[in-house]
Image: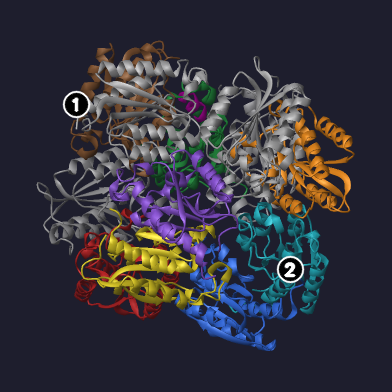
Chain colours: A blue, B cyan, C red, E green, F brown, H yellow, I purple, L orange
Amino acid sequence: MTRNEGTEKLVLLLSGPNLDLLGTREPEVYGTDTLADHVERARVAAEKRGYGLEHVQSNHEGDLIEAIHGARGRCAAIVINAAAFTHYAWGIHDALAAYDGPVIELHISNPYTREAWRHETVVAPVATGSVCGFKGLGYEIAVDGVIRLLEEGAGE
Amino acid sequence: MTRNEGTEKLVLLLSGPNLDLLGTREPEVYGTDTLADHVERARVAAEKRGYGLEHVQSNHEGDLIEAIHGARGRCAAIVINAAAFTHYAWGIHDALAAYDGPVIELHISNPYTREAWRHETVVAPVATGSVCGFKGLGYEIAVDGVIRLLEEGAGE
Amino acid sequence: MTRNEGTEKLVLLLSGPNLDLLGTREPEVYGTDTLADHVERARVAAEKRGYGLEHVQSNHEGDLIEAIHGARGRCAAIVINAAAFTHYAWGIHDALAAYDGPVIELHISNPYTREAWRHETVVAPVATGSVCGFKGLGYEIAVDGVIRLLEEGAGE
Amino acid sequence: MTRNEGTEKLVLLLSGPNLDLLGTREPEVYGTDTLADHVERARVAAEKRGYGLEHVQSNHEGDLIEAIHGARGRCAAIVINAAAFTHYAWGIHDALAAYDGPVIELHISNPYTREAWRHETVVAPVATGSVCGFKGLGYEIAVDGVIRLLEEGAGE
Amino acid sequence: MTRNEGTEKLVLLLSGPNLDLLGTREPEVYGTDTLADHVERARVAAEKRGYGLEHVQSNHEGDLIEAIHGARGRCAAIVINAAAFTHYAWGIHDALAAYDGPVIELHISNPYTREAWRHETVVAPVATGSVCGFKGLGYEIAVDGVIRLLEEGAGE
Amino acid sequence: MTRNEGTEKLVLLLSGPNLDLLGTREPEVYGTDTLADHVERARVAAEKRGYGLEHVQSNHEGDLIEAIHGARGRCAAIVINAAAFTHYAWGIHDALAAYDGPVIELHISNPYTREAWRHETVVAPVATGSVCGFKGLGYEIAVDGVIRLLEEGAGE
Amino acid sequence: MTRNEGTEKLVLLLSGPNLDLLGTREPEVYGTDTLADHVERARVAAEKRGYGLEHVQSNHEGDLIEAIHGARGRCAAIVINAAAFTHYAWGIHDALAAYDGPVIELHISNPYTREAWRHETVVAPVATGSVCGFKGLGYEIAVDGVIRLLEEGAGE
Amino acid sequence: MTRNEGTEKLVLLLSGPNLDLLGTREPEVYGTDTLADHVERARVAAEKRGYGLEHVQSNHEGDLIEAIHGARGRCAAIVINAAAFTHYAWGIHDALAAYDGPVIELHISNPYTREAWRHETVVAPVATGSVCGFKGLGYEIAVDGVIRLLEEGAGE
Amino acid sequence: MTRNEGTEKLVLLLSGPNLDLLGTREPEVYGTDTLADHVERARVAAEKRGYGLEHVQSNHEGDLIEAIHGARGRCAAIVINAAAFTHYAWGIHDALAAYDGPVIELHISNPYTREAWRHETVVAPVATGSVCGFKGLGYEIAVDGVIRLLEEGAGE
Amino acid sequence: MTRNEGTEKLVLLLSGPNLDLLGTREPEVYGTDTLADHVERARVAAEKRGYGLEHVQSNHEGDLIEAIHGARGRCAAIVINAAAFTHYAWGIHDALAAYDGPVIELHISNPYTREAWRHETVVAPVATGSVCGFKGLGYEIAVDGVIRLLEEGAGE
Amino acid sequence: MTRNEGTEKLVLLLSGPNLDLLGTREPEVYGTDTLADHVERARVAAEKRGYGLEHVQSNHEGDLIEAIHGARGRCAAIVINAAAFTHYAWGIHDALAAYDGPVIELHISNPYTREAWRHETVVAPVATGSVCGFKGLGYEIAVDGVIRLLEEGAGE
Amino acid sequence: MTRNEGTEKLVLLLSGPNLDLLGTREPEVYGTDTLADHVERARVAAEKRGYGLEHVQSNHEGDLIEAIHGARGRCAAIVINAAAFTHYAWGIHDALAAYDGPVIELHISNPYTREAWRHETVVAPVATGSVCGFKGLGYEIAVDGVIRLLEEGAGE
């Protein structure tokens, strides 16, 4: 796998609804770091590998769809923690399907150990891979991993 | 998260049925690297962080159960690509439930983009996290990630 | 049950999509009162017990999520008629899960006597209680009830 | 909605199986008040609005069916906490279907946050409305609400 | 496990609907012993271990519920063959949930080798254990076993 | 098919819950005849063929079970309109299974054109036959038919 | 219920696939009478009440549909034993839905005591009533019953 | 069917999420025409029959709900390609339910030949009709058809 | 899309079971036009575009299968209103799968607003597109549309 | 297993709908041989073992039912490729159930590797055995096998 | 029930995967006794009644199958705690089906109060009876009970 | 279909769990021949066509997986009677998926006439064809058939 022609060395990191509460909501599940902390560490990881990071958080499905549209032909990869949208927002699925680069599905906790409705995912069918349950480390692992996927290939 | 008392700086890497064919079976899905290639890269990643790596591959569910038993109180973490056993071998689930350290579920491809029967997993309910779809990079990402989880904690 | 520390004597009343049509849409199901009529009567009921009432109506899920965020640490309780969002908008569920005070699910009609898809609710798993089918009286019963829950406790 | 011709200013309050244990069974779910306490507060609420209250508790489905028969043409409304019968006793459903006044389904806790079998209800399809999860306040809120429904109408 | 404070050395044995026909109904499934024969042998078993036995058979769910209520704080254990009620009578479930001692589910035949509707059980979720398919011996095995559980503990 | 040895020329007619309301409840579904009218016509039909008719109506499942027990070895056939019990009261199923003569399931209306929960029947698996939807004529058609089945055989 | 204007005193009796084998196929289920025997007895029953009987048997769904079309505005009632077509031939359902008189669903055995796929019926949703399990008597009971429904009404 | 009183000769054409990408996304499924091309052809078709066309595209469910509200009493018909919203956005369902004129569900491809989740539709239960799979022609066929429905009636 | 080599400018229009009753059956659902009226208007539409129209109606699945066979290599397109066969007659599915030109599924009403069994369709998986719910206009819209698809292409 | 008394040394080979297209329809699935080719090879195989072969192909379920009727007491075995009828035509199931000799279910391709609706079979519950996926060889393997079953028994 | 001819006074006790961990794994669920403790107590119980006990534990399904084969015609009964294999290992089911003596299903805890996947059992359909939830006492109760079943019969 | 390059004229015949009991287990279902008898006849059939036969029976899934691995590039075809493993052992599925030659699924009886859990098969999705229900003849029919498929092609 290599970077699509025309795209920049840029990863789009997307955060879905309620993630703006990170650090204050159910800390026993999600830890005490804020979203800004997570994003900052992810940015550092990206920059270490010569990539930029663009971050969008929204509680509106439409905003995330449009951010994905904006990444077409410009960002080399998308890492998305769609939060609750993961489980029903098929509009995000279709937007991702129209995006050419690798897509990593990210969850801080492991959704498969939680409620049944969190086991359905609209992101997985259009995802290249996923990173779940690494808590605070997940953001940088996902960003670092997808860049390596682009730069080093994948043993194919 | 920190290393359980009494355990060594050692990660147990488990590979389930048919993974001994890696590199020759459906290369368009799994790549051309052999299992030995994957394990070697994972070992390098572990050693960079001062850990050893023990690897067991078996086509027998009972062997994997017993390898997990052997890790209790000795290995600091388990990374398991249970392959087809992922979807029905509850004996592995119970063995992992009796293990105290972190468990990472690993898949080379993304099972949620494949047949319906690959969407059920007996590993997830007892896993700390998962790494799917990173193809050749998955082994080292998972091993590296779980060691960092042990050494650095998780932003909790 | 008592008012959480730091919150004001204030109830947040939320109205979901299409409720701005109340009084004109299917009056045989929902009555002829407008949403403003319902809210006004709820406000009077709140003020009789020394509480204020804040009302937000939106056809955008994201707006309701953000209104719930804004109630954290400020409003003593939430009464929510999520309308169609009740049945799929898990983002609202997660937002309510991150709110500490009592949450009352409100419906003007009784959804369990209507179409099957109206029997699923994302609000119920995070609700303290519910009021359904009281038509025009529901708004004030719910607001009055939740304030009494806060002020008088619940026979616990 | 107005009182049916021929009926008295009387509300029938029905309590299903095991509610005679209230105050002693799972107090963390149901509180410490006894059924008599609940009924007494409901009676006071009814009398404040000029209504009488008749109460029947039984662990026998047949007794509840016959109490409902006895309310036809005599009681202005029914409030029913059918407890476990809520989930399978279709004989109660048919009895309520043959009753003309408003019927309020009452639960002390919120059944939708409990076991799956408590999510089915035979009462809802023939209920005018419901009051759930208000714990000790539920009895009086339901009785007071249904009388107001009869006396004041419902904003229709 | 030890006997709850305040309870007597007394086991309540409950028999559900149609068990009064035992010995005459489908003897190829249930044997030719009458219910009295079973109860007598169970009583002997109880008395050998210094316990009394109280037996109630009823074709009315309400009677069984009330017998369970009567055992609270008085009988040390319950053994219940709920017969057909096993499969739908949630009122019995709730009554057993409000009882503090051990509950043993008893069946003369093995319900899992019979019709599908006999595979659902409302007793199991509130049972400590079960004894099925021992035909004429089941009554005394269940009574003897539950007394040993109380007297000897369980290797915990 | 012939009358079982030892039984009398007697048909047991059973009516389940709420049928005591016949003639007053939903007359557009069930007609205006009372239960007494139906039973009387059925008795006339039986007597024309030299049989007696015994009728039991109850809102208690246990009563119906015991009436069925009482028919064993005494009544030549049973006609049962179990009303709402049809759909969940497996205790009645087991009682009928222990009865040797022919059993006819009777419904005044056609349950298969009504709500889904009326499509399940605990009586059918132990019934010889059924008569549904003949409204006021159903009682006598069922009684007359089962006697002919006994007296004339069935073309076997 | 009265005969529709314009129709004759004529009942259409329909027999579906494989019923031409009656008397030779699985006699332990269906008896030894031939279809001609059944039809003859039904004809006698009809004539006793002043009605004619028209009979059509076919193994072709299309033939039965067209026979139903031919009964519109001409035959006063239809009695249909659709045999295997009962369970999937929705074309027959639609044809019956376009017929105005009463429709009786007839089965010689009781389908609810047989395989699961025989429990679904496309006839029931458009049937006035049904007669099942009366074996050789079913044909005449159904024909006699539907004529009485037309001539005597139904106690409505 | 005729135009509702008070409405103008105006069709509202609605396009859901991701349709702004038309012509660039999966052209083998959706063709190479842009949304503007489709809308323009639809406008020409409308104008040929003396109607205007108003078009709204949005990736926000709330915007579409409000566009539907704005059509009440003003636009004579709605043609809606809800794209991914088709499969879960019940808020759009409720908004359409509150609209009085004809509603045509439009899809460029045939969703029933695609993934299972595209077979569910919240639009269909409130639609007058649908046009699927005509690719580039679908927009004008749907707009032209609904106008003819209004102007010529429908053979009723 | 262009006309397959060797086919004539001819559309085959197929009508399934009970459609011969059109105009007389449930006119509130299907209108008062007869099938001949619909076919005639469709023929006019085809001829305006230089195509002929062949029409076959049958209540026999086999006849429709054979008509489809006869269209192979001869008719340029098929428009099929399979009526009740739509929901179970997989033989028609297989026949259509063996036909090379475009296939349009046609329904006069909108099946998705009717009974659940009308939501399954054996035609859709092998259809190019569909036209539903346009009542009397559907026949000509479908025929006109499929010819344009052949002659003009589809914006691909 | 031996030939039933009275039957001839004759195998009935049945082919369901659309098989008359064999050799022209989806040759990549079914091969290029025509049905006549398959039947001829099967006849040769039968004759080698001293049996005759009778072949019936029809697109009408009724014709196949009647062919099966005609085989009773005359043909020693049936081999049936019911094609699409395999999946819903229960009339064929009932006809085969009334036939006494061995029945072999035949499919040219392997239906279990195709669409889900091809996994259900009405033939299997009444079949002695099956032969699937042997393409052009299947006809003769099935015919040869069933004759050997009759002549040699089966190692019983 | 009596001992099968040719078998010895010997009970085979089988323990499935992970039971070798007993006493160390989830002691709050399974207690602190080791498997050896359980087996020893069971052996004492068997010897009291003049029987021997043979014990096999394995984490390999194949080993258990072979142990069951070895019991045919030699051991008088089998008691099996199949642990996780209980829920999917149909090979064990088939092996038990080929064994003629009584089979008792044993569980230390009550699987019906645990995860849903523990409610399915492949052992139950071939078991004579079961003993669940008696913790440390279960082994001896089951062994003692099955010997009594053999020696005393079962009241049949 | 022709033999894959590099493979020998050798068929691998695999027998799953409990088949070593053949001839002694449920002879009314499986006949009295031993597995050795079946294999011997299959070997003769193979040798008649110039092929060798290799046979492996195991009660261990892992052994069968490894036997399949060993056939890659060496055996021309596999015939597998996976017995109970057929219904859950996805590891065998994956091993077969990695094998390039034809695979024939073999069953001695017809699993579709037995318990529901025997209707699921993990072998079918990767099988070329199947032979079921030919009892003692099945082994040689399957082996002979797959060799003919290799040698003669399949009429493609």
Residue C125 to residue H17: above or below: above
Q: Which is nearer the eye, I113 or H47?
A: H47
| Residue B35 place in picture, x, y as percent | 80, 65
- Residue type at mark 2 is Gly
| Residue at mark 2: chain | B
Query: Over which residues does the magenta segment extend?
Result: E34-42
Q: CA distance from mark 1 to mark 2?
A: 84 Å
Q: Is residue E41 magenta?
A: yes
Residue shown at the point (42%, 63%) measured from the top left? C125
Q: Is residue E52 left or right of residue F144?
A: right
| Residue F47 place in picture, x, y as percent | 25, 14
Q: What residue is shown with label 2?
A: B6
Q: Quadrant of residue L55?
A: top right
Q: Is residue E32 magenta?
A: no
**Dot 2 lies on which element?**
loop
Q: Quadrant of residue L9?
A: top right
- Residue type at mark 1 is Asp
Q: Is residue E152 left or right of residue H107?
A: right
**Dot 1 lies on which element?**
helix
| Residue at mark 1: chain | F
Q: Which is nearer the eye, E88 or A94?
A: A94
| Residue E118 place in picture, x, y as percent | 49, 37
Residue H24 to residue I11: above or below: below
| Rendered image: mark on residue H110 | none
| Residue I63 place in picture, x, y as percent | 49, 39
| Rendered image: mark on residue F37 | 1
